[in-house]
Image (cartoon, coloured by chain):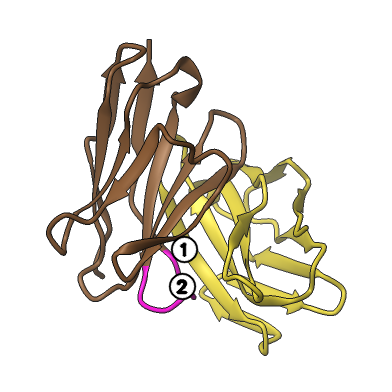
Amino acid sequence: EPEVTQTPSHQVTQMGQEVILRCVPISNHLYFYWYRQILGQKVEFLVSFYNNEISEKSEIFDDQFSVERPDGSNFTLKIRSTKLEDSAMYFCASTYRVEKLFFGSGTQLSVL
Amino acid sequence: KQEVTQIPAALSVPEGENLVLNCSFTDSAIYNLQWFRQDPGKGLTSLLLIQSSQREQTSGRLNASLDKSSGRSTLYIAASQPGDSATYLCAVIRSRDDKIIFGKGTRLHILP
C-alpha cells in the first residue's frame, strides 16, 4: 500500500532555531495536512493545503509557521523560530478526496 | 463547536476477551468517521472508515458502528490479542468545512 513518508523521524533543535519538517505525500493525493501531538495530548490540526495554497489553518498555526509544496512531491512545514512549546510529534497526512486520511509516521521535534 | 470524546481514556482487558471502545461527537453533521490505531511514538494507522450514510464497517476482528443521530460510534474488537495493545483514536470530518477533529484516544492494554 502506498505510504506517506516523513523525514527526519527525530529532530532536536535549540530554541530560536528554524526547522523544516519534510513529508512526501502519496503521489495522486490532492489534500495535504499537518497535525501535531504534544505528549499525552490530542492530535491537533495545524493546517490544510489544497491546490497549492492553504485552505485552512488553526490558531496554533501563527506567523512562525509556514508550509510549502516546492516541487510537486514534497510538502514541508517550517517553524521559523522554535519555542519550547513547539516540542511535539508532527504528523503529515494526505488524501485524494476529503475522506480516508493516510498519515506518515511522524517527526518527533524536541526543542531545547 | 464539534467535540469528540472517547471513553474510557484507558482500558486493560485479559487476552481473548471481546471489547468495545466508544467515541461520541457533539455535532452530527459529519462527512465520515475514521478509527485509527497509534502505537507508542509512532504514526497513525487507519483501521476503518465509515461514511455518514453507513451504519458499520468490518475488517477482520474489528467492527465499527456509527449512529450519526445520537453522535456515537463504537469500535468492537473480537478475541483480543496482546498485539492489539495501542491507543485507538476516532476522528470525524465535519460536513460544513471538511475539518478533521480527533478524540483524545483510548489507551488499550491487552493482558497476556
CA neighbours of label 1 inside 10 A, class few (<14), some (14 to 19), many (20+): some
Q: Which chain's residue wears label 2?
A: A
Look at the numbered disc 2 and give the secondary structure of its residue: loop
Residue with the mark numbered 2? A100
- Name the kind of residue labelled 2 in the image: Lys
- Is B60 on the left or on the right of B12, as rendered? left
Q: Of helix, strand and loop, which mostly describes the magenta segment?
A: loop
Task: Kindly indicate which chain is depicted in brown in the rendered structure.
Answer: A
Quadrant of the rendered image containing residue B108: top right
* Residue B47 magenta: no
> What is the spatial separation of the Cα atoms under label 1 and label 2, in whole angstroms?
8 Å
Tell me what residue is drawn at x 79 percent, y 68 percent: B27
- The image position of residue A83, as x and y in percent, is 44, 18
Q: Quadrant of the N terminus of chain B?
A: bottom right
Q: Tell me if residue B2 can be seen.
A: yes
Q: Is residue A60 depicted above or below A11 in this figure?
A: below
- The image position of residue B97, as x and y in percent, is 60, 70
- The image position of residue A60, as x and y in percent, is 54, 38
Q: Are marks 1 and 2 in contact (CB under 8 Å)?
A: yes
Residue with the mark numbered 1? B46
Q: Is residue A42 depicted above or below A103 in this figure?
A: above
